Image (cartoon, rainbow, N blue to C red):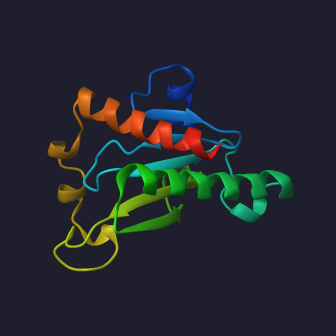
Amino acid sequence: MCGVCDRIQETLEGKNRYFVKELATGYVVLGDYQRFKGYTLFLCKVHATEIHFLEKDFREKFLNEMSLVAEATYNAFKPDKLNYELLGQGDGVHMHWHLFPRRAGDTPNPGPVWKLSKEEMYSEKYIPSDEELEEMKKSLRTELEKLL
């Protein structure tokens, strides 16, 4: 089973509280855990394991849309730096971008977010309240709409 496909299905059914906006090639969602405020994901509509497996026109549109999602994330959450990651080692290997807004001193030591323990990354204290989540979604959606 693919976790990203499951999350997309939840989005299509209106059951994903983190859903922000549908684009032509993917779904913009906020991360369930906001250890890095503004953590955003862009879920590819096509279940593929590699960018080069996508049809050329779709691939180019997907990469362009990812850059717009990144710009909107940057504009909405005002980080010092934005980290981009396209991972796929587990859970169905469905391509999805991780966009991490980074700020000076946001981790004990410089480096990738994945150096933090799972307990730190996924602590319940980083699950946004309904009010916080709605404000974050509104901010990100507003910035996306300016760019589209």
Residue drawn at the location 24% of the way across and 37% of the way down: 128
Residue drawn at the location 45% of the way across and 58% of the way down: 99
| Extreme residue in the right direction | 56
Residue 1 position in % (x across, y down): 54, 40
Residue 36 appears in the picture as rendered: yes
- Near-viewer residue (110 or 71): 71
Residue 67 position in % (x across, y down): 60, 58
Does 101 appear above or below 146? Answer: below
Q: Is residue 6 left or right of residue 80?
A: right
- Near-viewer residue (3 or 8): 8
Residue 1 appears in the picture as rendered: no
Does 91 appear above or below 1? Answer: below
Residue 140, located in which quarter of the rendered image?
Answer: top left
Q: Is residue 30 left or right of residue 141?
A: left
Residue 130 position in % (x across, y down): 26, 27
User: Quick one: quadrant of the C terminus?
Assistant: top right
Residue drawn at the location 41% of the way across and 33% of the way down: 138
Residue 54 position in % (x across, y down): 78, 55
Residue drawn at the location 32% of the way across and 67% of the way down: 113
| Extreme residue in the front direction | 146
- Near-viewer residue (9 or 42): 42
Does 45 appear above or below 94? Answer: above
